[in-house]
Image: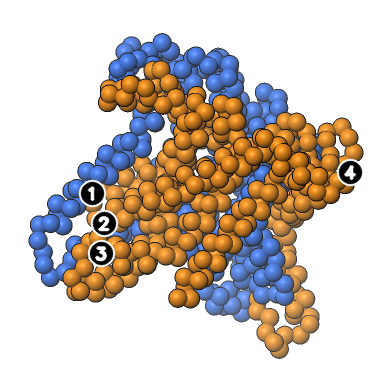
Chain colours: A orange, B blue
């Protein structure tokens, strides 16, 4: 139902009522269980509220507390490291897979399905099998590394140095198929005439990839970057099922600390403050990415 | 919708580099090089699943052997019988199924209704409302996890399946995905139905819903799989064993029988199997649903 400039107030009211009748069933649930909690979280960040006590306003005390909180510092660093490892790796792998699969090879559908399947399998099962694969003494990965002649293979999830790396590996393995699909869709949208023109100019495969494919994929790459960055910063359940933040603090990440402080220890205020920091980081990174994209488009 | 049709048809199109005036044998060789590369890559990616299945058919003591035993000997089919008596796996499967079906149904119904309101009916304030909606998609779930937890507790819904249904059935993501499809349907179609005297709800139910079956399949499968696989939600809210889902059951199996490696892998296989079935049935809808997310709308 279109409301034109000539519409009478009655028609506008009617359209509004009808529009809302469609939107409300979802919106009420969404507002009560997502929007309202979001607003409450913002307020909670400035309060002290431990389970069993009444909430009191404490200003910035929660944020000051973070500065000296060793868990928070470790979680902040680990979250950044995790994103720094996962984002570029997943981006390169998924783009590479999409580029390879964007040609007519036999078994294409099978390959695409195989790459995508890890994305939709349960994290608990994934964690169970990878924890066994990573097993230090007799796991298949280290057995394989020893046959290659490595005397002292990594300790993976059992070692503070390698635990985060293990999480990055599993995370790339699990996510690459999803982003590959996004890239494949992007590749299909590049006009074939561009490739033909490039060929006329004598460009080889690699040059075509650099000068036609990559620029043509720019909107997709931007979208993938944003999605990937956001999902890396909110990494949470993988940590819970694989390492529970350990060994020591080596895989403690911000989202996991929110859960530990808020739900395990019942410190609602402090946990909310940490979650706001996490949210702020995600927001800033996203805005920076948007700005960079705009600049690029302008030039 | 058209996005995946194009992906599906990709093999029929000449690949970049395959065409042009010079038809040498190089493209043919390249094709098989790519094929070999992809074959190795896929096998590597699927290796953890192969290991999962193989180990689930071994004796616990044979799971970690050096060198790795790729064919179980003896084959322990027994594991798949033993698991049902160790933990109430059937009850876990039932709870997961209830949650996945109810949440998916509610999501499809309310999500497509909202998508209709956001794309086919013009009224003041609509776009602002939509922006408020989708901007929350980027907000990490952990941000509102604590208030949700307090709310559910105060509503006395902790440790009920209701808590998860209410928290997960009305996601902004579903509305976003459905709207992406709805905007591709010409408004003229609705206009014509209006002239024929069909009400807005009639247009939605009788014309748009049948037209968007592929979109419903995509969203339905994505939601089903997400709900089935969800671990943190049930972990936070479902405390008593009788309410547990497959993922919680599997997790507790790992905790209780941590050296029963074969049994754990057996449980993992059972938990992944329904997803595999859904995926085989609807592979193209999964791909379609995801490809749509990347489209500008």
| Mark 4 or 1: the one toward you | 4
Q: x%, y% of residue B93? A: 57, 29
Q: Which mark's residue is nearer the viewer, 2 or 1?
A: 1
Q: How far apart are the alpha carbons under marks 2 and 3?
A: 17 Å
Closest to the camera, between mark 2 and mark 4, is 4
Question: What's the distance in space between the residues labelled 1 and 3, CA to CA?
Answer: 18 Å
Give a yes or no on whether discs 3 and 4 share a subunit: yes
Q: Chain of mark 1?
A: B
| Secondary structure at numbered mark 4 | strand
Q: Secondary structure at mark 1?
A: helix
> In which quarter of the view is residue A257 placed?
top right
Q: Earlier in the sequence, mark 3 or mark 4?
A: 4
Q: Which residue is mark 1?
A: B34
Q: Nearer the viewer, mark 1 or mark 3?
A: 3
The alpha-carbon separation of the residues under discs 2 and 1 comes to: 9 Å
Tell me the residue that label 4 is attached to: A56
């Amino acid at each position: 139902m279109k409301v034109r400039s000539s519409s009478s107030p009655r028609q506008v009211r009617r359209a509004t009522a009808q529009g809302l009748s469609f939107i409300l069933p979802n919106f009420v649930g969404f507002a009560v269980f997502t929007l309202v909690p979001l607003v409450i979280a913002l307020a909670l960040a400035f309060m002290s509220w431990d389970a069993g006590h009444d909430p009191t306003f404490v200003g910035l005390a929660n944020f000051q507390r973070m500065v000296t909180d060793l868990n928070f510092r470790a979680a902040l660093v680990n979250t950044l490291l995790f994103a720094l490892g996962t984002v570029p790796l997943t981006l390169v792998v998924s783009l590479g897979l999409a580029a390879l699969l964007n040609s007519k090879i036999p078994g294409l559908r099978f390959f695409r399905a195989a790459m995508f399947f890890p994305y939709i399998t349960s994290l608990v099962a994934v964690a169970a099998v990878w924890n066994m694969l990573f097993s230090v003494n007799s796991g298949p990965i280290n057995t394989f590394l020893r046959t290659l002649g490595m005397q002292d293979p990594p300790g993976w999830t059992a070692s503070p140095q390698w635990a985060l790396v293990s999480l990055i590996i599993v995370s790339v393995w699990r996510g690459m198929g999803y982003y590959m699909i996004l890239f494949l869709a992007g590749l299909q949208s590049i006009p074939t005439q561009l490739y033909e023109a490039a060929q006329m100019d004598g460009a080889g495969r690699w040059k075509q990839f650099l000068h036609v494919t990559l620029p043509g994929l720019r909107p997709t790459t931007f979208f993938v970057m944003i999605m990937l960055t956001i999902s890396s910063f909110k990494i949470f359940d993988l940590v819970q099922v694989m390492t529970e933040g350990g060994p020591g603090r080596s895989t403690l990440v911000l989202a996991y600390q929110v859960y530990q402080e808020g739900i395990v220890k019942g410190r609602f205020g402090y946990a909310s403050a940490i979650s706001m920091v996490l949210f702020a980081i995600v927001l800033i990174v996203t805005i920076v990415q948007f700005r960079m994209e705009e600049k690029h488009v302008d030039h | 919708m058209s996005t995946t049709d194009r992906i599906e048809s990709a093999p029929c199109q000449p690949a970049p580099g395959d065409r042009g005036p010079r038809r040498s044998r190089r493209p043919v060789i390249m094709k098989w090089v790519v094929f070999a590369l992809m074959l190795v890559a896929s096998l590597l990616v699927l290796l953890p699943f192969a290991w999962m299945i193989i180990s689930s058919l071994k004796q616990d003591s044979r799971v970690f052997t050096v060198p790795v035993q790729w064919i179980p000997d003896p084959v322990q089919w027994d594991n798949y019988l033993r698991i049902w008596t160790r933990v109430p796996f059937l009850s876990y499967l039932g709870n997961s199924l209830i949650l996945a079906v109810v949440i998916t149904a509610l999501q499809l119904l309310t999500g497509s209704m909202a998508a209709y309101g956001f794309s086919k009916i013009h009224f003041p304030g609509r776009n602002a409302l939509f922006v408020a909606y989708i901007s929350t998609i980027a907000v990490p779930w952990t941000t509102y996890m604590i208030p949700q937890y307090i709310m559910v507790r105060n509503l006395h819904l902790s440790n009920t399946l209701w808590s998860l249904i209410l928290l997960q059935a009305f996601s902004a993501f579903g509305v976003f995905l459905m709207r992406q499809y709805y905007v591709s349907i010409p408004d003229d179609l609705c206009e014509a139905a209006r002239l024929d005297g069909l009400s807005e709800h009639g247009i939605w139910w009788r014309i748009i819903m049948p037209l968007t079956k592929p979109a419903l399949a995509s969203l339905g499968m994505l939601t089903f799989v997400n709900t089935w696989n969800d671990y943190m939600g049930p972990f936070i809210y479902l405390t008593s064993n009788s309410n547990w889902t497959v993922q919680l059951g599997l997790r507790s199996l790992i905790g209780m029988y941590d050296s029963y490696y074969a049994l754990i892998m057996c449980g993992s296989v059972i938990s992944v199997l329904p997803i595999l079935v859904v995926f085989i049935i609807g592979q193209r809808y999964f791909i379609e649903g995801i490809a749509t997310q990347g489209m500008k709308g």
